[in-house]
Image (cartoon, coloured by chain):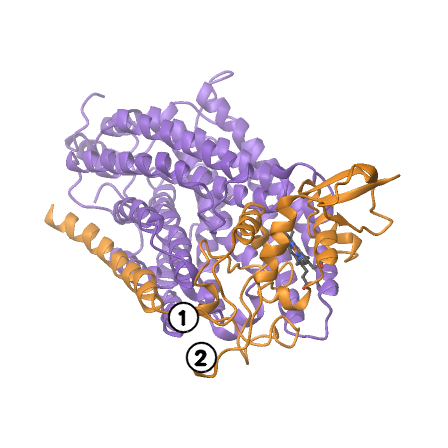
Amino acid sequence: MTRTALIFLGAFAAVAMSFTALSLLPSLQLSTIEPTPGTNEYTYDEQLGRQVYIREGCMYCHSQQVRPDGFGADQARGWGDRGSRPGDYVYDDPHQLGTMRTGPDLHDIGNRQPSRDWQLAHLYQPRSVSPGSVMPAYPYLFEVKRKANVRPSEVTVPISSKYAPPGDSVVVATQEALALYDYLMTLKLEPLDSDQNG
Amino acid sequence: MSDPTPSSLSVSTTDPGSAPPAWRRVVDRSTRGPVAAFIASATAWLLIGSLLALIASFKFQFPDWWTEQAWLTFGRVRPAHLNTMIYGWISMAGVGIGTWLWARLLKTPLRGQGLLWTSIGLWNVGMVVGTIGILAGYSRAIEWLEMPYVAFAFIVPALLLVVASFLLTLRERNAQHLYISVWYLGAAILWGPFLIIAILLPIFSGVPQGTANWWYAHNILGLWITPPGLAAAYYFIPKVIGRPVYSYHLSYLGFWTLALFYNWAGVHHLVGGPAPQWVVTVSIAFSAMMMVPVIVVAVNHHMTVVGHFEKLKYSPTLRFVVFGAMSYTAVSLQGSLQSFRYWQEVTHFTHYTIAHSHLGVYAFATMIAFGSIYYIMPRVMDWEWGSPRLISLHFWTTGLGVGAYFTALTIGGVIQGFQLLDPDVAFLKIVEDTQPWLIVRSVSGTLMTVGHIVFAYLLARIILKSGARPDGPTYFHPVPEGTFQVAGGDGTSRAPATPETD
């Protein structure tokens, strides 16, 4: 029995060790990290939008991590002026770092594409602004209604004629679509303070 | 017939040509209910997971197909596919196969049947809740952990019940020597629940959550899915061929190096990301060191099979398991190489990674699971498969399917990776150039799904014992006299020289 116990406990201890090193230590090391400039707690709407981002699994096609200088071509592609830092994520739970780039990295999308009309049209029908895109359309984040029924407080989304609803109907953004837009606009990489340029 | 003690063993092994020793039948029978139920549940999740995979894959060819239904959007179907395959199919299959091996190798009837039945019930409920949860929009969006917490409230107790049953059986063992498969299974059954419980602790956020996430996801592969696969390969290859495993010493070396190195390797998923540099560097180093256990296992299996390759022609079990074992070598060496910074720079974030993970979970673990099930079910059910042609169809659809899948996504992924590194290539051009490879993925996925349906049909037949009783073990071709005469082989007529008898 002692030998058996030794095998299994030894194997177990090996894994407990790496858990401490790879999971707990980074938590401790980064627990005192300061948020980078422009990284703030999410407002209610932004948090709601983040929830939509999580729910719809945008993460399976989009990363949120710009690679550092000298590694990859992210900055040359215009995906951000600096690499992402741990301080950019202090309010992120769950993290949405992502592992796939079927679509572009989004960590700096707020600087790259601030146009609300573009973003909403793109969510309603990506191919209406990016022909050939394979991104899913999210029509259920929008309502199609008669122009006459649109209330002044509602946001109408201009859609190119090929994808626009027929007749006198228009596309109106739901609260979720607007919140998702708000969240996307929080994704901005601001220049670092000089002391963070390590 | 009723004497399960090893004393009957020594009698029958010295008497080649007799019926299998009585204890073995008793032990096999004792596992019938739980093992069949685990394998049947696993197969149901395999079918569901395949369907989800096809929906996700075809959405790349038809992005405007089924977009009104929120629950069928790509970003929900894809994690639902992953979770049903990992926690439904391969985990339950691994436990089913592991349970059978555990009792057999400890030479004692299975204990804790009731615990296992409860486990199966809880586990399936957890999977239903989890899968529907993701599709309904309650995904946690942490890769490999998307199922909402409630799902794990069923699955974790289910796992602990399996642990309990394993310990009860271990306590009553009649085997003096613990064969290497027992090491792998025993370690995995401790590692699995530990990994899941540790990662569900609500203590992570931001970047550290990322490192914990990849520590976990990679370890579920290496310490929960891989060990039962290796345990099965270590058991079935010598068993079917009828000669002892080449080296016991190598098998121990392989075990300890896996246990010590693998669990440090996962965070290479964050190379070039915002994680602390030292964490990533440690992971790369250990990923490279993983070559040791992999080469050790590969040499050991190769030396066992060498000179007996002609048996692959006949035995379904051997053919699937050897396919899986070779894939294990391939996927692990690939894993070690791709953790290096240069290759990560190219291939990370591309379909190349998806190809790699299917080489692991499918070409290795799933193929070994199929092969093991072909061996186990006739003994558990006391019935034969009966249709070599359908088994053959299953082999070729899945084997060619995963081969084409892997090749296409590897090539497509590397091209995608180099294009991403070139800022002059417009992004939409990359999207366009990836399309042909994704078409191959949909086609090969369809092929694999056909194989799964065939397999599920065969499994249903053997569990229901439908039709006339097929006679004799099922081989792909008529077996020439003497092929499996060394000892045991795939049939039940001979007592094996390995591994139980040493």
Q: Secondary structure at mark 1?
A: loop
Q: Tell me the residue at 75%/41% (across/down).
A: A151
Q: Are marks 2 and 1 on the same chain?
A: yes
Which residue ends up furthest to the left in the rendered image?
A2
Which residue ends up furthest to the right in the rendered image?
A167
In the displayed structure, would residue B314 be above or below residue B116? below
Q: Quadrant of residue B16?
A: top left
> What residue is disc 2 on?
A196
Which residue ends up furthest to the front in the rendered image?
A152
Where residue B428 appears, x then y in whole percent? 74, 63
Chain B painted colour: purple
Q: Are marks 2 and 1 in contact (CB under 8 Å)?
A: yes
Where residue B265 appears, x then y in whole percent? 38, 63
> What residue is disc 1 on?
A34
| Residue B444 showing in the rendered view | no
Q: Earlier in the sequence, mark 2 or mark 1?
A: 1
Of B145 and B319, which appears nearest the observer? B145
Given the image, what chain letter belongs to the residue carrying mark 2? Answer: A
Q: Which chain is orange?
A: A
Left or right: A70 as drawn, with respect to B66? left
Where residue B444 appears, x then y in whole percent? 64, 46
Q: Quadrant of the N terminus of chain B?
A: top left
| Residue B355 showing in the rendered view | yes
Given the image, what chain letter belongs to the residue carrying mark 1? Answer: A
Q: Quadrant of residue B267?
A: bottom left
The amino acid type found where label 1 is placed reads Glu
In the displayed structure, would residue B487 be above or below residue A192? above
Of A185 and B377, which appears nearest the observer? A185
The amino acid type found where label 2 is placed reads Gln
